[in-house]
Image: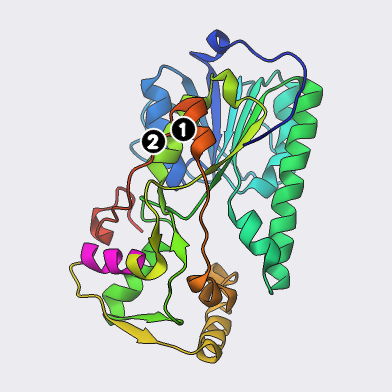
């Protein structure tokens, strides 16, 4: 956990029934977060480019957080589940209207991609670090406590670009390509466990002005993770060893597709790199209790991919 000292902060009781704005509301974390907030008695507002069906008792504001001049009604809490790079531009308006608490999501990729051989990944890591720093600066000036969550590999709603993409490849081809032994360790984290972390931390003083790495409840190798996805899809695990040169060529082709423009050969190399993080501070400070990795067949995810 990382923390900084600042001025007085809101008392927990003041946030027990707060006005909460959620960005990235139709994403995988938002899918689980909105009903949790409603059940806890919060007045929930959601910013999205489209309204999600089935989200009862949520006040929707249609808009794009990436657009300049984004504005919303006065709220007490901002839970930013959209990409972190957009947060610094949103904070001045939120804080000027009396916002008193910020919870947002970064990623543990800020560590792994900082040492990447790909310039775009290095730039991404630097962008994450800069956004977190700006968050702390702006919130300190407004005496509004902040919390940053840095999840590992997120799954659980059929919207991720890791487990879901692997499952789709398995369904289509019945095999999965591996580079080397694929022995790098992973800790997939369910999106609902991240939503629960938001609710638990919202009014917990121990989480004020702190950042947490949030891993899943189980550590397994990349190969074992893929084997479990095979099992979820009812398929026998079958792998094809692929040399790094072939992976580079394949990833270059895939990256020409707009939605996969961030795919690259470093993804293959990291199959054999341990990406393991300690969530002990989160367990201590707000009772974080993530589940073990249990992927569902594609058709059973709560959000249709």
Q: Position of residue 241 (x, y in %)?
A: 39, 87
**147 is higher (above) or lower (below) than 77:** below
Q: Are marks 2 and 1 in contact (CB under 8 Å)?
A: yes
Residue at 58% in and 83% down:
252
- Give the colour scheme shown: rainbow
Residue at the image position 57 percent from the left and 85 percent from the top? 248
Numbered marks: total: 2
Q: Determine the secondary structure under disc 1.
A: helix
Q: Which residue is mark 2?
A: 289
In the rendered image, the quadrant that contains the C terminus is: bottom left
Q: Is residue 234 visible?
A: yes
Residue 173 location, quadrant: bottom left
Residue 292, how many percent across, how many down? 32, 48
Q: Assess disc 2: are there few (<14), some (14-19) or many (≥20) residues with their C-alpha within 10 Å of its C-alpha.
A: some
Q: Which residue is more in the foreground, 22 or 212?
A: 212
Is there any visible trace of residue 161 in the rendered image?
no
Distance between the alpha carbons at the discs numbered 2 and 1: 7 Å
Of the pair 83 and 8, the residue shown nearer to us = 8
SS at badge 2: loop
Which span of residues is magenta-colored?
A: 225-233
Q: Main secondary structure of the magenta part?
A: helix
Q: Is residue 138 left or right of residue 192?
A: right
Toward the viewer: 170 or 25?
A: 170
Left or right of 92, for residue 272: left
What residue did someone put label 1 on? 283
């Amino acid at each position: 956990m990382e923390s900084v000292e600042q001025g007085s902060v809101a008392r927990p009781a003041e946030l027990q029934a707060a006005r909460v704005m959620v960005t990235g509301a139709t994403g995988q974390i938002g899918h689980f977060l909105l009903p949790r907030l409603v059940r806890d008695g919060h007045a929930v507002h959601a910013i999205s480019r489209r309204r999600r069906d089935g989200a009862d008792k949520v006040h929707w504001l249609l808009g794009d957080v990436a657009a300049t001049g984004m504005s919303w009604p006065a709220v007490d809490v901002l839970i930013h589940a959209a990409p972190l790079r957009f947060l610094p531009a949103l904070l001045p308006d939120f804080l000027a209207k009396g916002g008193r608490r910020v919870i947002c999501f970064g990623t543990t990729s800020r560590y792994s991609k900082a040492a990447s051989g790909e310039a775009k990944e290095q730039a991404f890591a630097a962008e994450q670090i800069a956004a977190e720093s700006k968050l702390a600066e702006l919130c300190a000036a407004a005496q509004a406590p902040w919390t940053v969550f840095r999840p590992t590999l997120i799954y659980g709603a059929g919207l991720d670009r890791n487990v879901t993409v692997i499952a789709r490849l398995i369904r289509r081809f019945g095999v999965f390509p591996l580079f080397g032994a694929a022995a790098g360790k992973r800790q997939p984290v369910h999106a609902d466990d991240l939503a629960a972390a938001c609710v638990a931390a919202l009014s917990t003083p121990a989480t004020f002005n702190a950042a947490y790495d949030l891993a899943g409840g189980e550590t397994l190798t990349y190969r074992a993770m893929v084997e479990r996805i095979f099992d979820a899809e009812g398929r026998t695990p079958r792998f094809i060893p692929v040399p790094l040169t072939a992976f580079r060529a394949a990833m270059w082709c895939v990256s020409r597709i707009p939605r996969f423009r961030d795919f690259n050969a470093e993804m293959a190399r990291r199959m054999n790199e341990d990406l393991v993080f300690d969530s002990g501070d989160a367990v201590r400070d707000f009772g974080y209790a993530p589940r073990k990795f249990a992927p569902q067949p594609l058709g059973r995810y709560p959000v249709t991919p």
